[in-house]
Every structure is written in C-alpha cells, then in structure tokens.
Amino acid sequence: MAQVQFLDKLLHEYLVFRGFSNTIKALDNELRTEKDQSFRAEKVMEQFNHCINHNDLQGLLSLWKHLDANLFSKLEHSYAMAVKKLENSLLKLYLVTAYNHNKTEKITEFFNKLAAELQQQSEWKDWFYFPFCRNPEESQPFSLYFKKEWQDTFQLSLRNFLATIYQCLPQPTFVRVEQEAALIRRLQEENALLKSRLQQQQQQLSASQSSQNLANTTSSSGSGADVHSRRRASCRPQQSLSDILPFDISPPGHIVDDFCIIATEVNSVTQASDAQARGLKMLIRNIGSGGSPVMGRKDNVGHGEKSAKRRSGSVGRSWI
C-alpha cells in the first residue's frame, strides 16, 4: 500500500516535470475515485465494455493489441487457440452491439478495416454476409450471439482469463524500482564485506610464507660450506668425447694380400695338371692302336723311311 502511494507520487512528479497538465488532471480524478489500489481484471473489462458500448473500434483494437503484446504473447503455445477464440468473440460482440444500436456505418467500417485479416479465417466466412442480413438475430449463423446467456458467459470467461493471468504476471519495472534499489544496496554491502575478508586472507598468507622462508634460511646456514662445495662441483663443466685427444700411433706399413698369392699358385698348378692330362690321353690312344712304338718302327723299315721317322718322331715327342 505504501509502495503504491510512493509510486503515485513519483509519477505525479514526473508528469509535472514534463508539463503534462491534462494527464495530471486525469490522474488526479482517477486517484480520487480509486478504492482498491491493485491490479484488477474488472478494470480491463470496464474498458472493453466502454469501447463496445460507444462503438470505439480503434480503442478496442488498441487495448487488445496492448494485452496481446504484453500478456498473451508470454503464455505457453497451448493457450494460443484460447486467446484467438476470445479475440474473435470480442469482435463479434462488437458487431452485435453495433447492430443493436443501429450503427450500420460502424459495421461497414469494421469490415473495411479488418476484411483483409478476417477473410483468411474460416470462422469469419459467414460473417461477411452480416451487413446485408435483414434480421441477423433470427438467422442461424448469428442468432446465438444475440442471446444474453452467450454474452454473459463470454464476459465471465474473459474476466476469469485476465484474472488468472494477472495473478502470474510479474510487476512492471516502474513498480520494481524501489525493490531493485534495495537489492543493489544489499549486494554492494556484501561485495565490500567479501573484499575485506579476501584482504585479510591474503595478509595471513603472506605472513605465513615469510615465516617459512626465514625458517628455511636459518636451517640452511649450518651446512653452508657443504652446499657451496656441492654447488661448485655441480657447476664444473662436463668433458665431452670430442675433447679427448687420441694417442700418437704411427699407421702400419703396406699389407700384402695373401689371397692373391694363393690364387696365383692355384692357377699354375692347374695349368700343369691340364698338360699332364693331355699327354696321358695321347699315350692311352697310341697303346689302344694295337702295337708298341718300338715294334712298329722295326716292322715298318721297308715301307719307307719318311713315314717311319714321322711316326717314331711323333711318339717320341709325346713321351718327352
């Protein structure tokens, strides 16, 4: 209650600053007649009925588009068919009320303005005949909407639908200004407290590290010489294999290839054995001819000296 009054004062101050005098007068009049300072579905229904009874088509469409953009569009997809059915019923109630008020020009204006949108919906196919029907309250497609039971049921359904939405509707940003300011202040205080605790933890950690470093320095002072010698030993340059010089040893003389000598000896022996084999073959051939070389020379003395000498000479060469 106090928060709503505070916001009303803020809004009044803003309107005075902007110079909206007519808006200030209207706001003051409504605040004086206001009893329940809360969001109610009855107020929206009153605006709908006001637009319908006064044949204000533009005001009716503007109010529905505002609710559709800010309330109905945030619902789940399963409620889309219900919202569309309520919209069509509201427009049909506007046409029926205009007919009852004998406002035929308002009916013509309605179809001239919304014909392009409504002709794509099968539900409105019969309603394009409505401006030309003589007694629509007796016609089968329109008679239901002229009954008071249907009109009361529709308004009750629309009011309950709006009331259900308003219960789940988040408050506007203008209403949440004070709450968000208090939340920001609380978060800033928590942030400052956490920063101070973090600084304390860092100081304690630095103090513990400094004490530990001092203890390590004290314990290592007694064995400083050993540490120094080990460091010098570890710092000595390592000698690699490339730095070692070889011994001065003279190379050996010329090495004779013994396998070459062996090969030469083998060749000479092979030649000698081949010559001996050829001599033996000739001797065996002469022996197999049937006579001795000496006996053959004696027998053939009378046959001619040249032939005997040629045979005896050939045999003698073979023996030699």
Image (tube, rainbow, N blue to C red):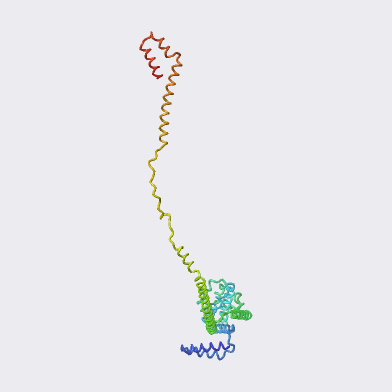
Q: Depth check: 315 or 45 in front?
A: 315
From the top left corner, tell me how far across and down residue 116 is, in percent. 51, 73
Find residue 237 and report its image quarter: bottom left
Question: Where is residue 96, by image quadrant?
Answer: bottom right
**Residue 164: where, in percent of width, then height?**
61, 79
Q: Nearer the viewer, residue 261 or 77?
A: 261
The residue sitting at the right extreme is 149
**Viewer-nearest residue: 100 or 294:** 294
Say which quadrant the C terminus sits in: top left
Q: How many marks?
A: 0
Rendered location of residue 113, percent (x, y): 50, 77
| Snapshot quadrant of residue 266 | top left
- At 40% from the left and 53% from the top, the residue drawn is 245
Q: Is residue 104 visible?
A: no
Q: Residue furthest left?
A: 306
Vertical placement of 152 versus 33: above or below?
A: above
How far across and down, in percent of the image, does residue 51 sit? 54, 83
Compared with residue 47, is residue 213 higher up or lower down, i.e. above or below?
A: above
Question: Where's the N terminus, which quadrant?
Answer: bottom right
